Image (cartoon, rainbow, N blue to C red):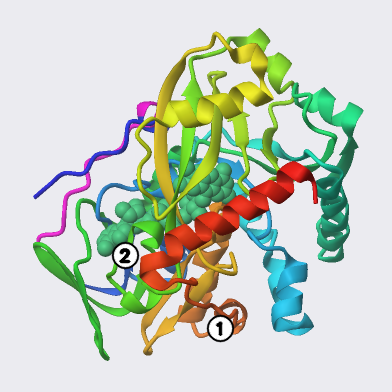
Amino acid sequence: MANTPYPQSYYAASANPVPPRPALQGEVETDVCIIGAGYTGLSSALFLLENGFKVSIVEAAKVGFGASGRNGGQIVNSYSRDIDVIERTVGPKQAQLLGHMAFEGGRIIRERVAKYNIQCDLKDGGVFAALTSKQMGHLESQKRLWERFGHNQLELMDQKRIREVVACDSYIGGMLDMSGGHIHPLNLALGEAAAVESLGGIIYEQTPAVRIERGANPVVHTPQGKVRAKFIIVAGNAYLGNLVPELAAKSMPCGTQVITTEPLGEELARTLLPQDYCVEDCNYLLDYYRLTSDKRLIFGGGVVYGARDPANIEAIIRPKMLKAFPQLKNVKIDYAWTGNFLLTLSRLPQVGRIGDNIYYSQGCSGHGVTYTHLAGKVLAEALRGQAERFDAFAGLPHYPFPGGQMLRVPFSAIGAWYYSLRDRLGF
Ligand SMILES: Cc1cc2nc3c(=O)[nH]c(=O)nc-3n(C[C@H](O)[C@H](O)[C@H](O)COP(=O)(O)OP(=O)(O)OC[C@H]3O[C@@H](n4cnc5c(N)ncnc54)[C@H](O)[C@@H]3O)c2cc1C
């Protein structure tokens, strides 16, 4: 059977050592079978194991092979659409519940890191950088909105203040969120996997779920075995393919690209980001960046609708990096990779249950490091019979992409072009 390795990323090159995890051979029985060992699957597993469930995870490649092991590492609070949009869509009662959960994922990450002693270079502090006065106005209302839900670690920054934390002249201001921050994403996933195993959970790597047999006693079929379970959690996100056709219709995998410089040295690194905060700008197609523990700059941006891998990632992302930091023009790029996230039309997560026993959460549309950790808790609560918070997510409406499977890629690209133009023109 094919052995799928990690992509050649900075994260894979600096991953903490892990034990070998063999593929599933034969038949096993468990309470919950989770499909996918990214943050959604691992977080669900941890909450379930902590509450006495038996858990097996089948992972098509390796722990953190998907977005969870390749992302920008930015701990960004809330959802990819903010609570005011949710309020307008589903009304104040549901928005109230979702609003209060919007900052929980970051706390869960910090609790996990502390409780299981996960070595993942956790740092506090994330900056949202505004390029236009319209974006700055949006940050001001976002701060008021988040404060309504009890989030009070926020500071608005004018042009002078943001220049003290980011050596980029393009920004007119921004917002600092001290409960944001950054991590080595793959090492977080690997640490969570070790925690799962320490509680008796089993992770089968190189074990794709190829078919789900639905019914009162569902079975997950893999190339050389099967898992009989009381419940299944589908956590394959943008890498799931068509395993669950009703989910694929209302979501679209998208690629985003990341580059990593050679080590910059302490001094240059400190001039770029003196407090070591991570940064994302407020554009529709946003740039995001941060320093690593060995003082490289990780810089991401760009979206490829439909998740085709671009031929030359450095050629796409390096100009964006040099626009923000022209002082890096002679710096070498050591790593470049792409990863897929799952977009929904509303940009809100797609959560629900199929029949009585197949649960899913996916499609957080770009910002997922915190949400996926929350999702694990919410799914575990639902399996324990406490479904109020699960129902708040499951009640969010989702629609197929305009153009269907055939035309959703060009239609979405046209939409993104329009929103990018609005960002550039500041309206
Ligand atoms: C390049 C990039 C940068 C990003 N940067 C940020 C960021 O800085 N901050 C932020 O908040 N969010 C970011 N995101 C989004 C965030 O990483 C994701 O939302 C999150 O990691 C999704 O986690 P997940 O567990 O749902 O999915 P994934 O991490 O993609 O995990 C899914 C797993 O399921 C497995 N799988 C799929 N199908 C099957 C199957 N049939 N059988 C078995 N296993 C299967 C896959 O192999 C994979 O390991 C970024 C995403 C990308 C791609």
Ligand 1 within 8 Å of the CB at mark 1: no
Image: magenta residue range: 13-28
Q: Is the magenta stretch mostly helix, strand or loop?
A: loop
Give the Cα separation between the discs numbered 2 and 1: 21 Å
The answer to if 16 sits in the magenta stretch is yes
Above or below 314: residue 183:
below
In the image, taking residue 331 as reference, residue 69 lies left or right, namely left
Report which residue position mark 2 lands on. Answer: 35
Report which residue position mark 1 lands on. Answer: 387
* Residue shown at 52% from the left, 25% from the top: 318
Mark 2 or 1, nearer chain start: 2
Q: How far across and down, in percent of the image, does residue 414 sit? A: 55, 56
* Residue shown at 78% from the left, 69% from the top: 84
Q: How far across and down, in percent of the image, does residue 427 sit? A: 80, 51
Count of labels in the image: 2
- Please name the amino acid that badge 2 sits on: Ile
Q: How far across and down, in percent of the image, does residue 226 sit? A: 15, 70
Above or below 217: residue 33:
above
